[in-house]
C-alpha cells in the first residue's frame, strides 16, 4: 500500500478558509493524476483540487460542506490499490461507524447528516431522521437538506373533516399540497456573504455621494461602425464600448489623482498606477476582476482582457490574484437595461463609475431639439477625501473624452 495525502491548496493571505463542495469521486473509485476531486468555494473564487497521483480514493476525511484551511488533510489515495477493491467505508468522520462495529457497515445510522446538511435542517426545523438520505449508506447530503420540506401536521376535528375532500388532489413534486404557500431557506454562498459584508462596510465607512452627467455616444458609435470590422480582424476581438469607458476613466484619474486614491486611517494613499476593476456577473454572483496598469493598455488590450474575464467568470476560473486589488471600479448596469443607478464604492477604493444603457433621447443642441444616443454616467465617491469639484470635473473629463474619442488616442 502506498498512501498519498490530498491537502487543501495554499490559499492567499486574503482568504482565511474555504468550504468543500461535493466530492466528485466515491470511496473505492479510481482517480487519474490531476483529475479534479472536489471544488473548494472561498469568498472570492472556486478552487479545484486535483488528485496528486493516480490510484484509488481510499479515505475521505472532510465531507461535503465542511470548512477547511490551507494545507488541511481532506482525503487519501492509494497508488497501489485497484478500483473496487477498497471497501466503501464512511466518507467523513462524523458518519463513521463506532469503533466496535465492522469496518464496512451496510448503512449509516438513522439521522446521520453532513455538517452542512444538519445546519440547513436545523434552520428548517426538520429532523435528520425524517429525511431520506441519498448519500452513501443513507447519509443525508446538503442537497437532500435543501430539498427537504417540513412535514405537515395532520389537522383534527372539524378542520380534518373540512380538508378530507381535498385528500385526493394531486401533489406537486415539492411535496407541498396545492394552494399552500411555500418558502425555501438556502444558506448564502461564501461569495454572496462576502459581497454583503463588503457592501455594508462601504456604506458604514464611506461618506458616499453620487454625481451624474449625460454623454452623447454618437461619436463612439460612429467610430465603432467605421472601424469595428477591421478592428476585429486585426485584434481578434470585438470592438465594444468598455474599452472607451476605461480609457475615458483613465484620463479622468490621471487628471484628478484623488479619484484614484484611497483612505488608510488618517492618511490618503495616492496610487502611482491605475488598476481598474470591471464588475462582471457570474453564476456565483458579482465579481470584480482587475485590469492592472490600465493606463498602459490600448483599447485592443482592454477588450481582450475583458473578454477573457467574462469567459473565466462564466466558468468559475478567475484566480484570487485576478480579483485582488484595484484603485477604481466600473460597473456596467446597461447590459441588463439599467437606465440610472447609484453604484456603491468597492473598499478600499474611493470612487466608482456606473454606466448604463444607451438610448435615443431628445436633447437640445444650438436651440434645436434633436435625437441623440445618450448614456447617463453616475460616479459615486467618498466625500471624506474627494470634494464635489474634483468629482464633477472628473466626470466631465470622461464625458468630453467619450464625445470626442480622438482625445483618447492623442492623450489631450
Image (spheres, rainbow, N blue to C red):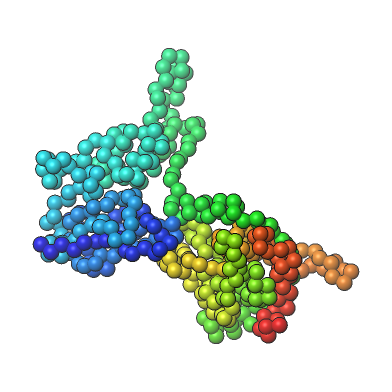
Where is residue 199 drawn, in percent x and y? 56, 54
Does residue 336 appear in this view? no
Residue located at (84% from left, 70% from top): 365
Residue at the outermost top position:
157
Tell whether 270 sits left or right of 316: right
Q: Quadrant of the N terminus?
A: bottom left
Where is residue 317 drawn, in percent x and y? 41, 66
Residue located at (32% from left, 63% from top): 9
Q: Nearer the viewer, residue 102 or 156?
A: 102
Residue at the outermost right position:
367
Q: Nearer the viewer, residue 3 or 241?
A: 3
Using the rendered view, name the quadrant where residue 369 is placed. Answer: bottom right
| 335 is higher (above) or lower (below) than 190 | below
Residue located at (27% from left, 52% from top): 62
Residue at the outermost front position:
266
Q: Quadrant of the C terminus?
A: bottom right
| 239 is higher (above) or lower (below) than 6 | below
Residue located at (46% from left, 18% from top): 159
Using the rendered view, name the quadrant where residue 108 is placed. Answer: top left
Where is residue 130 drawn, in percent x and y? 31, 33
Does residue 13 appear in this view? yes
Where is residue 249 drawn, in percent x and y? 64, 72
| 193 is higher (above) or lower (below) than 9 | above
How many numbered discs sit on the rendered protein?
0
Amino acid at each position: 500500500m502506498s498512501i498519498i495525502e490530498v491537502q487543501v491548496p495554499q490559499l492567499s493571505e486574503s482568504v482565511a478558509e474555504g468550504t468543500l463542495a461535493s466530492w466528485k469521486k466515491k470511496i473505492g473509485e479510481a482517480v487519474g493524476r490531476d483529475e479534479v476531486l472536489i471544488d473548494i468555494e472561498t469568498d472570492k473564487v472556486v478552487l479545484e483540487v486535483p488528485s496528486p497521483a493516480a490510484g484509488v480514493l481510499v479515505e475521505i476525511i472532510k465531507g461535503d460542506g465542511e470548512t477547511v484551511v490551507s494545507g488541511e488533510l481532506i482525503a487519501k489515495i492509494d497508488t497501489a490499490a485497484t478500483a473496487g477493491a477498497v471497501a466503501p467505508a464512511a466518507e467523513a468522520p462524523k458518519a463513521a461507524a463506532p469503533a466496535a462495529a465492522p469496518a464496512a457497515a451496510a448503512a449509516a445510522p438513522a439521522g446521520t447528516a453532513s455538517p452542512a446538511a444538519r445546519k440547513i435542517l436545523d434552520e428548517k426545523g426538520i429532523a435528520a431522521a425524517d429525511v431520506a438520505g441519498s448519500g452513501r449508506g443513507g447519509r443525508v447530503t446538503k442537497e437532500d437538506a435543501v430539498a427537504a420540506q417540513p412535514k405537515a401536521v395532520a389537522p383534527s376535528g372539524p378542520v380534518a373533516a373540512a380538508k378530507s375532500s381535498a385528500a385526493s388532489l394531486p401533489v406537486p413534486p415539492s411535496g407541498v399540497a396545492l394552494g399552500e404557500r411555500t418558502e425555501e431557506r438556502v444558506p448564502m454562498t461564501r461569495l454572496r456573504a462576502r459581497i454583503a459584508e463588503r457592501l455594508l462596510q462601504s456604506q458604514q465607512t464611506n461618506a458616499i455621494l453620487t454625481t451624474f452627467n449625460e454623454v452623447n455616444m454618437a461619436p463612439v458609435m460612429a467610430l465603432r461602425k467605421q472601424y469595428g470590422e477591421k478592428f476585429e480582424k486585426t485584434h481578434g476581438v470585438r470592438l465594444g464600448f468598455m474599452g472607451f469607458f476605461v480609457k475615458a476613466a483613465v484620463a479622468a484619474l490621471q487628471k484628478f489623482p484623488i479619484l484614484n486614491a484611497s483612505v488608510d486611517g488618517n492618511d490618503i494613499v495616492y496610487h502611482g498606477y491605475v488598476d481598474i476593476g470591471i464588475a462582471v456577473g457570474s453564476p456565483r454572483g458579482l465579481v470584480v476582476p482587475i485590469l492592472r496598469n490600465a493606463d498602459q493598455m490600448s483599447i485592443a488590450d482592454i477588450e481582450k482582457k475583458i473578454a477573457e474575464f467574462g469567459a473565466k467568470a462564466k466558468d468559475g476560473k478567475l484566480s484570487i490574484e485576478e480579483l485582488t486589488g484595484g484603485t477604481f471600479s466600473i460597473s456596467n448596469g446597461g447590459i441588463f437595461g439599467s437606465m440610472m443607478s447609484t453604484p456603491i464604492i468597492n473598499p478600499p477604493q474611493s470612487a466608482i463609475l456606473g454606466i448604463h444603457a444607451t438610448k435615443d433621447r431628445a436633447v437640445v443642441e444650438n436651440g434645436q431639439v434633436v435625437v441623440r444616443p445618450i448614456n447617463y454616467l453616475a460616479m459615486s465617491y467618498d466625500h471624506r477625501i474627494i470634494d464635489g469639484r474634483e468629482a464633477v470635473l472628473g466626470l466631465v473629463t470622461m464625458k468630453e473624452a467619450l464625445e470626442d474619442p480622438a482625445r483618447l488616442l492623442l492623450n489631450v
